[in-house]
Amino acid sequence: MTLPLYAYELISDSQGLLVALGLGFGFGWFLERAGFGSSCRLCAQFYLYDMTVLKVMFTAIVTAMVGLWGFSAAGLLDLSMVYLTPTSIGAQLVGGLLLGAGFIIGGYCPGTSVTAAATGSGDGAVFIGGFMAGLMIYAIAFPGLETWANSTSLGELTLPEVFGVPYGALVLGVVVMAGLMFAGAEWSERRFAHMRPGAR
Amino acid sequence: MSAASSAPPLARAGARSPAGERRHMNPYLAGFGLGLVLLAAFLIMGRGLGATAASGSVVAWLSGLAAPEWTAANPALKGYYAEPPWVNWTFYLIVGVFVGSLVSARLAGRVRLRIERGPQLSAGARLALAFAGGAVAAAGAKLAKGCTSGQALTGGAQLNVGSWIFMFSVFAGAYALAYFVRKEWR
């Protein structure tokens, strides 16, 4: 068991920064290839005639999820060495609603705004400016919210623990759920094809 | 030749449109590629991807230039203030995202200066909404300890409870408001 490499000190901090550049390159490459440098294409997800966002997101989640499970089940990866963001239900519920609102108003999420700006989008660049300004406003005006989010933390918590089912069974369940969601997405694109701009 | 017969046939992925742009990648294939990048991050670094912390690191560094003691004590900034951007892992990740996006778009003929919006919206109004949306998204990402990358994708693949709550909340928030801003996009 020698994965993750960084946790077993097989790569240094400065090598880690180079790895970050490479991973970021791949991340940006696939975001752009999927068409996620375009706010109109991203937001089409929320008008049901173009479900690209859902298809890309859930294929990525399923791919990485099955890979994590497989490497861990094969004894190659120590999952306890992989950072898991602590759960605080209220903060993540409200934060998600706000991020969704910011997404449909501003046209991007934080990662895709970088892809957009890199490809010449003025609205993408301004979204990044708004995001940084928003972080500063949050820090100045609402420091109590951060304290609340931390104080209501339940620590590391995963779905197999909550539902009391084996890890592999939950992985299989998510794969099946994703398949049903993809079928629904394909149906939705046919059903709402008339709403696509230019279709009328 | 009639207008109908001169319309291009349904283009295959990879084919060029009349404007010289390549078609986008099949979404399932792009998602698979993204998933492999995420898996590589887990296996090599023991952490996932993220897009919020890089901005946080820059904001905290700028804030620290003006008010170092306040920044170091602020609950929302102190975590970011520990490392300046040039030694911050997430900052390098986002530099990589910028370069990867640019190279991909350049090879596909998709780099051009633009302000994307629906036909009924002015460029100024679109930029104002982009700024406002960015600011609202920042509050959401800070509160939830991550965004679509750091929470939905990364935590989603880890079957993290908070990440799955976050992911469904993102979709709920966006679908709930979509009707009211439809003129911005269509």
Image (spheres, grey):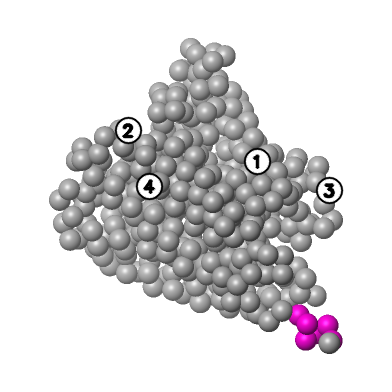
Vertical position of residue B21 compared to residue B156: above or below: below
Alpha-carbon neighbours of circle 4 within 10 Å: few (<14), some, or many (≥20)? many
Mark toward the viewer: 2 or 4: 2
Q: Which residues are magenta?
A: B2-7
- Which type of secondary structure does the marked residue at label 1 adopt? helix
For badge 4, the amino acid type reads: Gly
Chain identifier of the residue bearing label 1 in the image: A
Residue on which disc 1 sits: A125
Residue on which disc 2 sits: A14
Q: Which mark is residue A94?
A: none
Mark toward the viewer: 2 or 1: 2
Alpha-carbon neighbours of circle 3 within 10 Å: few (<14), some, or many (≥20)? few
Q: Nearer the viewer, residue B43 or B139?
A: B43
Q: Quadrant of the C terminus of chain A?
A: bottom right
Mark toward the viewer: 1 or 3: 1
Q: Residue at x 59, y 55 (%)?
A: B105
Could you tell me how far apart the alpha carbons at marks 2 and 4 are, in whole angstroms? 18 Å
Residue on which disc 4 sits: B48
Q: Are marks 3 and 4 on the same chain?
A: yes
Alpha-carbon neighbours of circle 1 within 10 Å: few (<14), some, or many (≥20)? many
- Which type of secondary structure does the marked residue at label 4 adopt? loop
Residue A141: horizontal and vertical position, in percent? 60, 25
Q: Are marks 4 and 1 on the same chain?
A: no
Q: Residue at x 78, y 57 (%)?
A: B118
For badge 3, the amino acid type reads: Ser
